[in-house]
Image: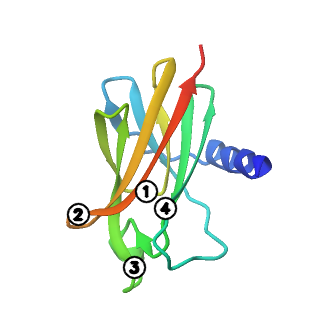
């Protein structure tokens, strides 16, 4: 499992996108990155989130079966929506991509929460929370 996380981190570090929307304040940014395709998709309502901290950046990849972030890339049975990202319970940003990088967090402990919403802004009951430490 450790090798899988390292592999994901390496893919996320290599993959970059030109978009770098500002998250909260002048220093914290979210950078979308391409997501890896799942080999097998479940139809069960689950929310899988993987993350890696590297050089002060948090690389995040999420997967929800039968869920699409983009209107033109979903099947009829898919739920279209987005994620709400909260850092330390207060900063909030809508995320419209499965994989992204959080940049510019201050040193120390942080709680990251992701919650899935449908396109009508209704919570889907899928939430993942994890803690990270940005080293000195």
Q: CA distance from mark 3 to mark 1?
A: 15 Å
Q: Earlier in the sequence, mark 2 or mark 1?
A: 1
Crowd around label 2: few <14 · some 14–19 · many ≥20 (10 Å): few
- The residue shown at (61%, 62%) is 36
The residue pinned by badge 1 equals 97
State which tag comes first along the sequence, 3 or 4: 4
17 lies left or right of 86: right
Is residue 116 or residue 10 the one in the foreground?
Answer: 116
Quadrant, the C terminus: top right
How far apart marks 2 and 4 lie (CA) works out to 16 Å
Residue bearing the label numbered 3: 78
At a point 31% along the width and 30% down the height, the residue shown is: 24
Residue identifier under label 2:
122
Q: Point out the tag, 2 or 4, that comes first from the N-terminus.
A: 4
Viewer-side residue, 35 vs 82: 82
- Of the numbered discs 4 and 1, the one sitting upstream in the chain is 4
Q: Residue at x 28, y 33 (%)?
A: 90
Q: Are marks 4 and 1 in contact (CB under 8 Å)?
A: no
Mark 3 or 1, closer to the camera = 3
Q: How many marks?
A: 4
Q: Is residue 114 left or right of residue 123?
A: right
The percent coordinates of residue 21 (x first, y second) are 36, 40
Q: Secondary structure at mark 1?
A: loop
Q: Secondary structure at mark 3?
A: loop
Q: Which is closer to the viewer, label 3 or label 4?
A: 4
Q: What residue is shown with label 4?
A: 47
Cα distance in 3D space between marks 3 and 4: 14 Å
Q: Earlier in the sequence, mark 3 or mark 1?
A: 3
Q: CA distance from mark 3 to mark 2?
A: 15 Å
Q: Position of residue 28 (x, y in %)?
A: 40, 28
Residue lying furthest bottom: 76
Question: Picture coordinates of residue 122 (x, y %)?
Answer: 23, 63
């Amino acid at each position: 499992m450790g090798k899988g996380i390292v592999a994901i981190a390496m893919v996320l570090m290599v993959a970059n996108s030109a978009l770098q929307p500002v998250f909260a304040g002048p220093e914290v940014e979210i950078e979308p990155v391409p997501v890896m395709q799942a080999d097998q998709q479940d139809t069960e309502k689950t929310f899988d989130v993987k993350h890696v901290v590297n050089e002060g950046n948090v690389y995040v990849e999420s997967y929800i079966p039968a869920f699409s972030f983009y209107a033109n890339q979903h099947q009829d049975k898919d739920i279209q929506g987005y994620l709400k990202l909260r850092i330390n319970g207060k900063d909030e940003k809508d995320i419209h991509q499965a994989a992204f990088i959080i940049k510019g967090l201050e040193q120390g402990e942080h709680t990251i929460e992701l919650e899935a919403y449908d396109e009508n802004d209704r919570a889907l009951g899928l939430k993942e929370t994890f803690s990270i430490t940005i080293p000195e």
